[in-house]
């Protein structure tokens, strides 16, 4: 029964999550009650789904991996995706760890807990949706939702050997997702298969008037299109994604995956995305700018932490934020405030928006020639925990392949395409990234299915 499935998962979590650290919390009784009441005839009837701990579920904690919301905050409402999952019969079970406010690529910025890669416990699971990816990879979740602002679904999926889908901008409502960078954020699934990703996307996609960026356009039947194959499709190989800095073993796996798609009838086309090298700089201006604005709501009054015995209002703001936010979040707020400040706004923020347009046009031009694009997800497999401590710039550079699709609003997916030996007896997963035009998820999933 659905209750047995929840109980089995809870047993696996108590047996194994002590060493992995995928979950920040779960409410077994609420999940059992939902499972007992679930309508099994629905598409996700009785299936437990884990949620990243920045997606609101009524009555549950939503810590965002932050001291700010660690104690006391309980979601007063369901996110749109939470409602939609329930309406599909799913059981919302478990709150997955993340980098604080989804800022990071390793889940090491969580203020609350370390998460380890199930394939090699000395390594990061990736991030920021590292808890969601690790839970699915370790069989501690059947599927999960994450959020992706610049790679946070695809990169941990790649490092943990699972499927991770970032829907197109506007495909899924972010109502009830704690906002990081609103022009980039999307919610999407992390699953064991492309078929499951299609099922979850079906459940969460579609219009919602509570997110004004969510598009009111028809949602295709994703599962129906899944097995159409790739014969006759043109797949672009952008030369800028295969150059310097990429681990040769990662490149070999991605090239082999492209070759397999070619063997199934796709045509590989060399393309160029000339502004790729500016994606990191552009993203790390725009994302912090938006974050500095979004995070101003954490003022010590409205949510979570409040400094004790403030001298006055300013003291209350300052000490609540000083204690509540971790170092990476503060770094982003400072950077974002700087690039938005008068005198610097045009030099940084306006300029970044212009380069963003050039990056988007690169893709528009490429998609006149090809149906989808194949790239690596990350330049290297999962690194050791602690390896980039105090080196945020190095960490930002490792996002090079995942940021541009968010800047352009495309849909993108990471599919496992092989493993690389670590040299220490473990095998580290590598992901293939597939990109498709805005709202072309059915095509994306179709290519992903053949790449699986
Ligand atoms: N690693 C990127 C960052 O730190 C992306 C994070 C995300 O997608 N949420 O901003």
Image (cartoon, rainbow, N blue to C red):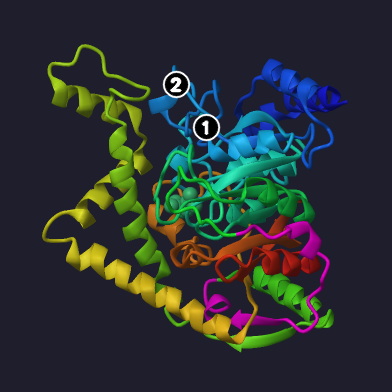
Q: Residue 45, located in which quarter of the rendered image?
A: top right
Vertical position of residue 73 compared to residue 259: above or below: above
The front one of 164 and 17 is 164
Q: Is residue 244 magenta?
A: yes
Locate residue 18, reporting x and y percent: 67, 26
**Residue matched to label 1:** 56
Identified at 53% across, 42% down, the residue is 107
Vertical position of residue 229 compared to residue 108: above or below: below
Give the residues in magenta: 218-245
Name the image quarter holding the C terminus.
bottom right
The image's mark for residue 363 is none
Identified at 48% across, 57% down, the residue is 150
The front one of 189 and 159 is 189
- Distance, label 1 to label 2, CA atoms, is 11 Å
**Residue matched to label 2:** 73
Name the image quarter holding the N terminus.
top right
């Amino acid at each position: 029964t659905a209750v047995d499935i929840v109980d089995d998962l809870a047993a696996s979590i108590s047996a194994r999550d002590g060493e992995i650290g995928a979950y920040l919390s779960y409410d077994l009784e609420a999940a059992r009650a939902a499972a007992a009441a679930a309508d099994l005839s629905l598409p996700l009837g009785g299936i437990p789904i884990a949620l990243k701990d920045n997606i609101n579920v009524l009555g549950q904690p939503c810590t965002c991996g932050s001291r700010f919301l660690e104690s006391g905050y309980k979601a007063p409402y369901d996110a749109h995706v939470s409602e939609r999952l329930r309406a599909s019969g799913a059981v919302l079970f478990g709150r997955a760890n993340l980098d604080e406010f989804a800022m990071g690529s390793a889940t090491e910025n969580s203020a609350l807990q370390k998460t380890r890669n199930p394939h090699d416990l000395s390594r990061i699971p990736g991030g920021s949706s590292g808890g969601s990816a690790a839970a699915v990879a370790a069989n501690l979740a059947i599927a999960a939702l994450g959020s992706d602002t610049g790679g946070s679904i695809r990169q941990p999926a790649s490092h943990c050997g699972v499927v991770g889908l970032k829907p197109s901008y506007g495909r899924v409502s972010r109502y009830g997702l704690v906002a990081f960078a609103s022009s980039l954020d999307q919610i999407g699934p992390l699953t064991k298969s492309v078929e499951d990703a299609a099922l979850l996307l079906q459940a969460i996609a579609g219009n919602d008037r509570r997110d004004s960026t969510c598009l009111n356009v028809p949602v295709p039947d994703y599962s129906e299109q899944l097995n159409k194959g790739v014969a006759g499709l043109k797949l672009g190989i952008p030369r800028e994604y295969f150059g310097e800095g990429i681990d040769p073993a990662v490149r070999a796996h991605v090239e082999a995956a492209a070759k397999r798609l070619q063997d199934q009838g796709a045509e590989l086309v060399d393309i160029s995305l000339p502004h790729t090298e500016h994606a990191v700089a552009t993203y790390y201006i725009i994302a912090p700018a938006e974050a500095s604005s979004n995070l101003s709501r954490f003022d010590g009054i409205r949510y979570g932490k409040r400094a004790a015995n403030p001298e006055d209002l300013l003291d209350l703001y300052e000490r609540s934020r000083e204690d509540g936010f971790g170092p990476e979040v503060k770094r982003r707020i400072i950077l974002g405030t700087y690039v938005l400040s008068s005198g610097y706004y045009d030099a940084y923020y306006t300029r970044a928006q212009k380069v963003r347009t050039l990056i988007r046009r690169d893709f528009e031009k490429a998609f006149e020639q090809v149906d989808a694009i194949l790239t690596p997800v990350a330049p290297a497999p999962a690194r050791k925990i602690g390896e980039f401590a105090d080196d945020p710039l190095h960490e930002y550079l490792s996002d090079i392949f995942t940021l541009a699709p968010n800047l352009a609003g495309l849909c993108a997916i990471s599919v496992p395409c092989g493993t690389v030996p670590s040299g220490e007896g473990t095998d580290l997963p590598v992901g293939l990234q597939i990109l498709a035009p805005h709202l072309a998820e059915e095509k994306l999933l179709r290519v992903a299915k053949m790449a699986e």
